[in-house]
Image (cartoon, grey):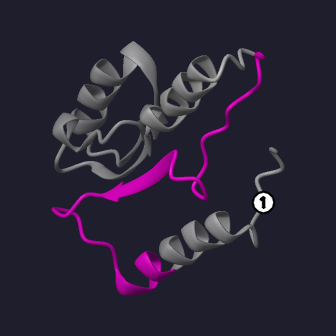
Amino acid sequence: MTGVSQMVVGATGVAREHGVLWFGSQTDQVPLGENIVVASQIYHWEYQLAQIVDDLLNDEVNGRVITANFANGGLTMAYNPGMPLADDIQAAADEAESGLKDGSISTGAE
């Protein structure tokens, strides 16, 4: 399972009670369930904030969309060291992340 926002604390609590694996989003959610959180996709808001500050400093307030992704470092993955993945699964995850970084895998979003 996965989830975002304020519901995560309650949902991870239920997942812990039932031994359901969890995949975090937005932040490293391992502290919410060290025995259930496999990995987390982490948003690095500092990427977008730096772009916004640069625009403001250069008087370029233009309403542009600033997309965070694996290629620009706005998104990263964190794996729970307490739940090591099998070598082939970790290799597949690493390959997918590399593909998202180099553009060989597309999410369809620009």
Instruction: Pick the residue in front: 98 or 55.
Output: 55
* Position of 48 relative to 109 (above/below): above
On whether residue 75 falls in the magenta region, the answer is yes
What residue appears at the point 21 percent right and 34 percent down from the top-left corner?
Answer: 32
Q: In this view, does 65 lie to the left or right of 33?
A: right
Crowdedness near tag 1: few (<14), some (14–19) or many (≥20) residues, C-alpha within 10 Å: few
Judged from the image, the secondary structure of the residue bearing numbered disc 1 is loop
Please give the residue where the numbered disc 1 appears in the rendered image: 106
The spot of residue 70 in percent (x, y) is 57, 55
- Which residue does the image show at 78% across and 17% down from the upper left? 62
Residue 105 on image: x %, y %: 74, 67
Q: Which SS does the magenta portion mostly show?
A: loop
- Range of magenta residues: 62-91
Where residue 9 sits: x, y (%)? 28, 22
Residue sitting nearer the eye, 9 or 64: 64
Q: Residue at x 67, y 37 (%)?
A: 67
Q: Is residue 14 magenta?
A: no
Does 63 sit left or right of 87 as displayed? Answer: right
